[in-house]
Image (cartoon, helix red, strand yellow):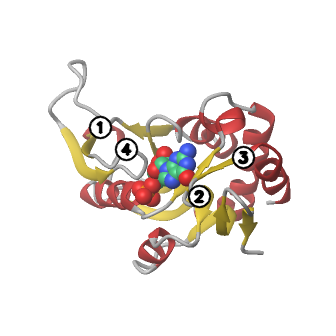
Amino acid sequence: MELLKQRILKDGKVIGDDILKVDSFLNHQIDPALLYEMALELKRLFGGEGVNKIFTIEASGIALACMAGYVFSCPLVFAKKSRSRNISDDVYSAEVESFTHGKVYDIIVAREFLRPEDRVLLIDDFLANGSAMNALIDIVHQAGAEVVGAGIVIEKAFQPGGERIRGQGIRVESLARIASMSEETGVVFCD
Ligand code: 5GP
């Protein structure tokens, strides 16, 4: 998606050779107009698939998932990263290995919000090693629901997540795919 690529080139900051910071429009400060355009693009890509639920992981997937929920006219559900007291024990859970923090943690979702009849579009801000996406897929399968596909804002195609998820037969659509990056060269897109 050209608009997103231009924004990454303008405002993204490469840290080392595998972290991209996009805090000024996606991960800390958020540009609603850009996110709305991204949601419309996801609707263009997945609009014919009968999506009736959007599923993401807190925190940074929520903003786009919310826009997508609005555009698809369906609810969004986000997996929570820790068990809180106001959620029942009746939850699905899966393990995620955090790419940015290197820690392993559980995500949980109340069973009442994912049903066997759901056709689920997964959304996240980044696809790196695929652990977060794998955990979301695992939970959708636990619910007996169907994964329609995954809409990713930025796929770092030089990391194995894309292959891991596509290898399971899941349609992954990334709005920007990065072939390589470094502090010296900046970001190089796949196409
Ligand atoms: P994965 O589970 O695919 O290894 O990593 C995806 C998760 O890690 C995303 O939810 C995202 O929050 C975080 N992440 C992975 N790579 C990056 C990155 O380059 N920049 C930022 N800001 N987050 C990342």
Which comes sooner in the sequence, label 4 or label 3?
3
Categorize mark 4 by other alpha carbons within 10 Å: few (<14), some (14-19), many (20+). Answer: few
Outermost residue to the left:
89
Circle 3 residue: 12
Whole-number angstrom distance, CA of label 4 to CA of label 2: 23 Å
Which comes sooner in the sequence, label 3 or label 2?
3
Label drawn at residue 112 = 1
Q: CB atoms at circles 1 and 4 under 8 Å apart?
A: no
| Residue behind label 4 places its C-beta within 8 angstroms of ligand 1 | no
Categorize mark 3 by other alpha carbons within 10 Å: few (<14), some (14-19), many (20+). Answer: some
Residue 41 image offset from top left, x and y in percent: 75, 55
> Looking at the image, which residue is at 26% across and 32% down?
82
Q: Quadrant of residue 27?
A: top right
Circle 2 residue: 151
Per the image, label 3 sits on a secondary structure element best described as: loop
> Looking at the image, which residue is at 69% across and 42% down?
71
Name the side, left or right, on which 22 lies relative to 87.
Answer: right
Whole-number angstrom distance, CA of label 2 to CA of label 1: 23 Å
Per the image, label 2 sits on a secondary structure element best described as: strand
Residue 65 image offset from top left, x and y in percent: 57, 41
The amino acid pointed to by label 4 is: His
Q: Quadrant of residue 83?
A: top left
Q: Closer to the observer: label 4 or label 2?
A: 4
Q: Closer to the observer: label 2 or label 1?
A: 2
Which comes sooner in the sequence, label 2 or label 1?
1
The amino acid pointed to by label 1 is: Glu
Q: Closer to the observer: label 3 or label 2?
A: 3
Circle 4 residue: 101
Whole-number angstrom distance, CA of label 3 to CA of label 2: 20 Å
The amino acid pointed to by label 2 is: Gly
